[in-house]
Image (tube, rainbow, N blue to C red):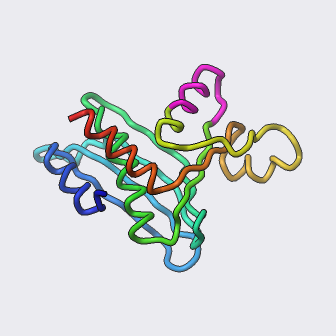
Amino acid sequence: MLNLAALEERARERGLLLRLQVKGLAGVRGLRVVLARPRAEQPPLLLGELKGWCLPLADGLRLDTMRVQGERTAAVGPLIWAATFAWALEETPCRSARLLAIRDGERQHRRLRRYFQRLGFRPVRELGGGPLDLAPRLLWGGAGLLMQGHCDEALRRSVRWLACIQ
């Protein structure tokens, strides 16, 4: 299985910069994974980023915002996902992750659900308008399907996805 250093090298081979920013020490740690294209005499062009946080627990990885933009970005998502899961497995006790397939619109929700299932995430429960859903909805920023996946499986799938793009 690829580690974080090998993934950074793969990004370099594609002419990309892969960087992780981690803030916090013992308790909650914030995570930002970015992928950018270097440019001569200009700041790098941001192609994608993922934000999340982790708690020092086996199921403590929470993934919040994933964004990919620009042209020639087929490898961006898989590289970001792979780096995120490699980091979690190498640097944290987290072995599983949770994310929300947000329900902005039904068509987009179906696309997100399929996308996350491709990474190995499975439904946990629907976050809706009930009183017990208020706190999780505030945490996640909306309603949708809460999903969970194993970091090792998601790393394996994202690396396989990346290999198909090459």
Relative image position of residue 88 (x, y in whole percent): 44, 64
Q: What kind of secondary structure does the magenta stretch mostly adopt?
A: helix
Q: Residue furthest bottom?
A: 26
Q: Which residue appears at 24% of the width and 63% of the height?
A: 5
Q: Residue furthest right?
A: 131
Front position in the image: 104 or 7: 7
Q: Which residue appears at 23% of the width and 47% of the height?
A: 44
Magenta-tinted stretch: 102-114
Relative image position of residue 117 (x, y in whole percent): 53, 37
Relative image position of residue 138 (x, y in whole percent): 73, 50
Q: In which quarter of the view is residue 68 placed? A: top left
Q: Which residue appears at 46% of the width and 61% of the height?
A: 31
Q: Is residue 153 left or right of residue 109?
A: left
In which quadrant of the rendered image does the N terminus lie?
bottom left
In which quadrant of the rendered image does the C terminus lie?
top left
Q: In which quarter of the view is residue 74 placed? A: top left
Q: Is residue 129 magenta?
A: no
Front position in the image: 36 or 133: 133
The image shows residue 10, relative to residue 92, as above or below, that is above
